[in-house]
Amino acid sequence: MRKCINPSNYSAYHTMICQQSQFRLDEMTQYPSRWFLSVDTISYIVENCSVKMMMGLLMLDEYMGISFKRDEVTICPGRESFMYTCNGVQFFITKAYAYAYNLDPDGDDILSYPFKELRVNITGEGMKFLRKHYQSKQIWADDFLLHFISQNFVEKVFNEDGTPKLNAVGDQIEIWHGHYTRVDYALDVINDFSNIMNNMIRHLNYGTSTGEPGFFISSNGGRVYKSKIYLSDNGGKTIYLGSTQSEQMLRVYDKLAEQTDETGVWKHDPGFPGIDKSEIKTWTRFELVLRKVKAKEYTPTSSDTSSVLRFPELFVNLLYEKFQPGSNTFMPEWWHSFWRPVMDRPETIKILVNFV
């Protein structure tokens, strides 16, 4: 159970949850910090594509013979759809389209029909399944998905002589045959002894006389993010920066508290490569939720190979700059100290292959 910290009793909570953990120097040396970046959720719409075609593009042909789980859902008011799920990979077909073409929702034809609009959602469960599936093929799942979506969404335009057709500013013209609706990225920081979450909580302007939610003041153009802090029964903390309905929201939480019970026993093997779970002393997750325009803007595409190769570096810089606390003339040293080491050495950020 999670409790939202109310401004009226924030002072008591502030004292309780912001107590610095007493880590010894030898622990900090023995258990160095590690950084991992992964794609947590992907949702997109693609044009003129069938479920069967998309399963093939995702290299999941072998699962087409397995019966899909079918549900009826309402994506938004007035838009009822059939949802077909295979190991956490979801496909949404609008009922009106299926009935217009006389397709049996329980038949094979509906999965082979190239609908004008096919919605696809790869959940956290789906990402876990795909990582294990691609690992058996020696493919890095997150890299593959970023490349796959960008390459299959974009059609480059050429002149009759085969040369690239350019726009007014000299870039090759591209036609998008689909678009992201949501992409969630997870940056996991293992053994952060700087207590970044406690410093962020201290920075929050809680306890206003009006009883309104607190704010996280960003120096990026004077941006102000509405914020909330939740405290779970086991003492885990979650910070929300931005509205859950906005195109960009950052969620920071204590993943270690979520993955262990009250006695400290692990619920699952965390599965970090090269790290035994006994070495994990702290685990902080930065979860960036991007929707619509922001999902496309901040996700690398095949037209910019360097952005794909440098994506971990670009992602960390995005968090550092967009959510930088303070003002344009002042930035807290604790924020700079937390991000600077990995910004100077972005190669230390690992893209996850297999992750719970």
Image: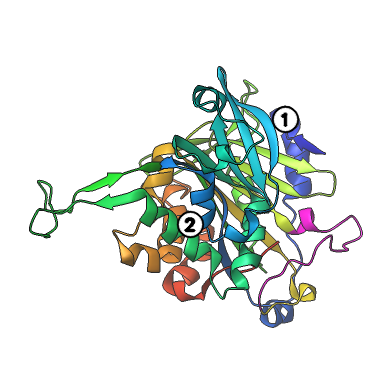
What residue would you read off at disc 1? Answer: 6
Using the image, determine if residue 214 lies above or below residue 64.
above
Residue 336 visible at all: no
Residues in magenta, as a range: 256-273
Which dot, 2 or 1, sits closer to the camera? Answer: 2
Label 2 or label 1, whichever comes before in sequence order = 1
Give how far across and how far down residue 233 sits, in percent.
85, 44
**Outermost residue toward the top?**
78
Cα–Cα gap, marks 2 and 1: 48 Å
Task: Tell me the kind of residue under disc 1.
Answer: Asn
Helix, strand or loop: magenta stretch: loop
Q: Nearer the viewer, residue 6 or 108?
A: 108
SS at mark 1? loop
Q: In the image as oriented, which residue stretches furthest toward the right?
A: 263
Would you say 31 lies left or right of 226 here? right
- For label 1, the crowd category at 10 Å Cα-Cα, with few meaning under 14, some 14 to 19 and many 20 or more, is some
Q: Residue at x 47, y 53 (%)?
A: 319
Which residue occupies the foreground of this view, 218 or 87? 87
Residue that appears at 55% across and 23% down: 99
Question: Which colouring convention does the figure follow?
Answer: rainbow
Which residue is label 2 attached to?
57
Residue 139 visible somewhere in the drawing: yes
For the C terminus, which image quadrant? bottom right
Q: Position of residue 54 (x, y in %)?
A: 50, 50
Residue 150: x percent and y percent?
Answer: 38, 54
22 falls in the magenta region: no
Residue 211 against residue 2 in the figure, above or below: above
- In the rendered image of this protein, does residue 5 appear above or below residue 177? above
